[in-house]
Image (spheres, rainbow, N blue to C red):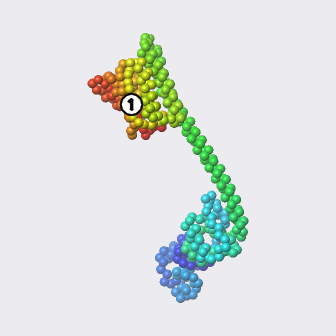
């Protein structure tokens, strides 16, 4: 098959396709094409303008390639990819139209074009030239029975659709299993961490109970520790259930500590700014405040909880006492500073939000 034109010639020469013969006009000056010819070590036949015009039947732009018969593809080659995009043409007899369609199909990302053997134009020089090089990037299949091919493709599509749905279901199940495993792991981590925390409190309570001269204050401290363990366990459950707390819920929990602390002659009040936090943050707030109150007695206390880029807790104790170093922290993301004034002590606690769960 003879093909004409510079665009087609460029595409063919760029690919390592067999070229039987090249004819160029004597004054042909396309540097890119000449370079490609030289690179492939091809020897073109050179004709003067008059001879070339008599030889060429179409608009040639000074170059003709003889590439032999067009190599049609098999339909199977086009549909090997599950996302294949195939165009089927019927009763298309104008080669210029076929060439134009090939150009459009290449731009649209079509994998291949199917045409019937009868009542249809085949791929010829006009199609090649009109496609402006797009044919080199497009698979064309010519089939005897177009209807049979369409039915076959429908069956293939249905099979692939079922496979795809099955894969989607498998992926959903896999994601669900991953989610459940993550939740199990998270629950385990929280329970291990909390068990260690509660065990330390239980050990502390046992130490108090082993004292030889137990007094009323000691028993009230043990009761307060046991109440802490109970509420802390409830917070763990709420953490596992992804519950949240607003300022009212936070204030209620802290007041419960203050009610227990009143038996140790500790009076206090808590003020909470507007906020909505997750259970992990609530658990940290509760733990820090309890650990402070646990270390004092016979005094008054004011607690301010502010919501900002982090959670800030300000605790003012009505006497001078060193408590910072005595407070255990369950997380290294809790920062505590302590200041002493003439008659009271101020603790500032920062709980970083970015590491909250």
Q: Position of residue 234 (x, y in %)?
A: 51, 28
Q: Is residue 27 left or right of residue 82?
A: left
**Above or below 216: residue 286:** below
Q: Position of residue 114 (x, y in %)?
A: 65, 68
Q: Position of residue 320 (x, y in %)?
A: 31, 23
Label 1 secondary element? strand
Q: Which residue is mark 1?
A: 271
Q: Is residue 23 left or right of residue 161?
A: left
Mark 1 surroundings within 10 Å by alpha-carbon count, few (fewer than 14), some (14 through 19), many (20 or more) = some
Q: Residue at x 70, y 59 (%)?
A: 155
Q: Position of residue 171 (x, y in %)?
A: 61, 47
> Toward the viewer: 11 or 244?
244
Q: Residue furthest top?
A: 213
Q: Residue at x 56, y 69 (%)?
A: 104
**Above or below 298: residue 33:** below
Q: Is residue 53 left or right of residue 303?
A: right
């Amino acid at each position: 098959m003879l093909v004409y034109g510079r665009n087609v010639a460029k595409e063919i020469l760029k690919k390592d396709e067999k070229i039987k013969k090249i004819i160029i006009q004597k004054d042909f000056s396309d540097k890119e094409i000449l370079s490609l010819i030289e690179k492939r070590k091809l020897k073109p036949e050179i004709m003067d303008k008059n001879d070339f015009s008599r030889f060429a039947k179409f608009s040639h732009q000074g170059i003709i390639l003889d590439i032999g018969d067009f190599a049609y593809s098999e339909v199977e080659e086009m549909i090997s990819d599950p996302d294949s995009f195939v165009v089927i043409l019927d009763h298309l007899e104008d080669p210029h139209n076929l060439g134009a369609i090939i150009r459009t199909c290449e731009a649209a990302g079509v994998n291949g074009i199917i045409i019937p053997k009868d009542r249809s134009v085949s791929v010829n020089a006009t199609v090649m030239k009109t496609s402006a090089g797009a044919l080199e990037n497009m698979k064309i299949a010519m089939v005897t029975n177009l209807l049979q091919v369409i039915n076959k493709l429908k069956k293939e599509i249905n099979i692939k659709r079922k496979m795809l749905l099955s894969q989607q279901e498998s992926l959903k199940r896999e994601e669900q299993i991953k989610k459940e495993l993550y939740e199990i792991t998270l629950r385990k981590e929280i329970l291990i961490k909390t068990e260690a925390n509660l065990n330390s409190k239980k050990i502390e309570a046992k130490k108090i109970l082993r004292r030889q001269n137990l007094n009323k204050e000691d028993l009230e401290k043990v009761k307060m520790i046991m109440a802490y363990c109970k509420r802390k366990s409830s917070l763990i459950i709420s953490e596992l259930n992804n519950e949240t707390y607003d300022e009212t819920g936070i204030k209620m929990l802290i007041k419960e500590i203050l009610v227990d602390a009143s038996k140790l002659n500790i009076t206090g009040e808590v003020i909470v700014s507007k906020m909505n936090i997750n259970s992990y943050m609530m658990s940290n707030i509760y733990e820090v405040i309890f650990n402070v109150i646990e270390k004092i007695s016979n005094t008054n206390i004011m607690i301010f909880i502010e919501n900002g880029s982090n959670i800030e807790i300000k605790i003012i104790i009505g006497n001078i006492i060193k408590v910072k170093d005595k407070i255990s922290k369950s997380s290294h993301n809790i920062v505590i500073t302590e200041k002493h004034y003439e008659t009271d002590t101020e603790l500032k606690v920062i709980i970083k939000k970015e590491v909250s769960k």
